[in-house]
């Protein structure tokens, strides 16, 4: 009986040492060659790729695409980012049916943005707004999320942080008429 009690107590102690919280996989900054583009655009707003591989004319992005404007210094962005990491793991995003694009703004350094991407588990392409030009497109605050159709038209917008994963997933489903 004593051996069974010791075994049970040992098992409980070992299992209580592990936290139930799963760590996200380390993120990375992929190249902008993954971004689908329209052949032409009426406007030209070039934004550098965060990986340093060149730049993309924002007005040429082709959907369906979710665009999330964020900064590592933004508390709302930090709160909602795990929901975007989960979203990117769904079949619709893994297959390329829908794209996800990040636009990093008002960062004190490029290294801060890259460090945050890695720490947060992000693995989708990001553009960098060095000059504040995204304010003329998305408005002055972050986070902001846009939903862009295949023709490059905005079909939905969310200003402010998502409060939960369901809220984000429901808006994606509505914008693109899919089930995640």
Image: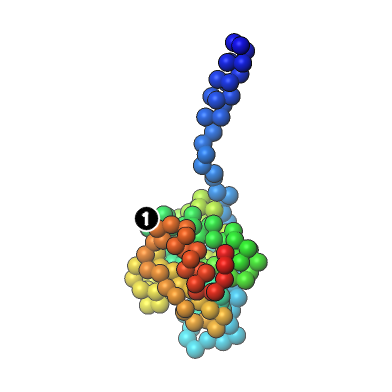
Relative placement, left or right, of 161 versus 11 is left
Image quadrant occupied by the N terminus: top right
Residue 66 x/y as whole percent: 51, 70
Residue 67 x/y as whole percent: 49, 70
Residue at left offset 44%, top offset 69%? 145
Label 1: few (<14), some (14–19) or many (≥20) C-alpha neighbours in 10 Å: few
Asked which quadrant contains residue 95, the reply is bottom right
For the residue pair 40 and 149, the one nearer the viewer reads as: 149
Residue extending furthest toward the bottom: 42
Helix, strand or loop under label 1: helix
Residue at left offset 49%, top offset 54%? 82
- Can residue 154 be seen here? The reply is yes
Colour scheme shown:
rainbow
39 up-or-down from 117: above or below: below
Residue extending furthest toward the front: 1
Asked which quadrant contains residue 2, the reply is top right
Give the residue pinned by disc 1. Answer: 75
143 up-or-down from 61: above or below: above
Asked which quadrant contains residue 143, the reply is bottom left
Residue 120 x/y as whole percent: 50, 52
For the residue pair 80 and 103, the one nearer the viewer reads as: 80
Residue at left offset 45%, top offset 72%? 146
Residue at left offset 45%, top offset 55%? 112
Residue extending furthest toward the left: 140
For the residue pair 76 and 109, the one nearer the viewer reads as: 76
- Can residue 55 be seen here? The reply is no
Relative placement, left or right, of 10 versus 162 is right
């Amino acid at each position: 009986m004593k051996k069974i009690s010791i075994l049970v107590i040992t098992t409980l102690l070992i299992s209580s040492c592990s936290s139930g919280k799963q760590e996200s996989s380390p993120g990375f900054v992929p190249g902008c060659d993954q971004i689908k583009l329209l052949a032409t655009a009426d406007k030209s707003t070039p934004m550098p790729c965060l990986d340093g591989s060149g730049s993309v004319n924002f007005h040429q992005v082709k959907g369906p695409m979710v665009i999330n404007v964020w900064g590592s210094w933004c508390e709302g962005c930090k709160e909602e980012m795990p929901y975007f990491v989960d979203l990117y793991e769904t079949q619709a995003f893994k297959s390329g049916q829908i794209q996800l694009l990040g636009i990093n703004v008002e960062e004190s350094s490029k290294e801060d943005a890259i460090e945050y991407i890695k720490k947060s588990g992000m693995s989708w392409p990001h553009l960098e707004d060095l000059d504040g030009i995204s304010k003329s497109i998305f408005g002055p605050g972050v986070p902001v999320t846009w939903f862009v159709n295949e023709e490059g038209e905005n079909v939905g917008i969310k200003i402010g942080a998502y409060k939960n994963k369901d809220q984000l997933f429901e808006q994606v489903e509505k914008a693109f008429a899919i089930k995640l």
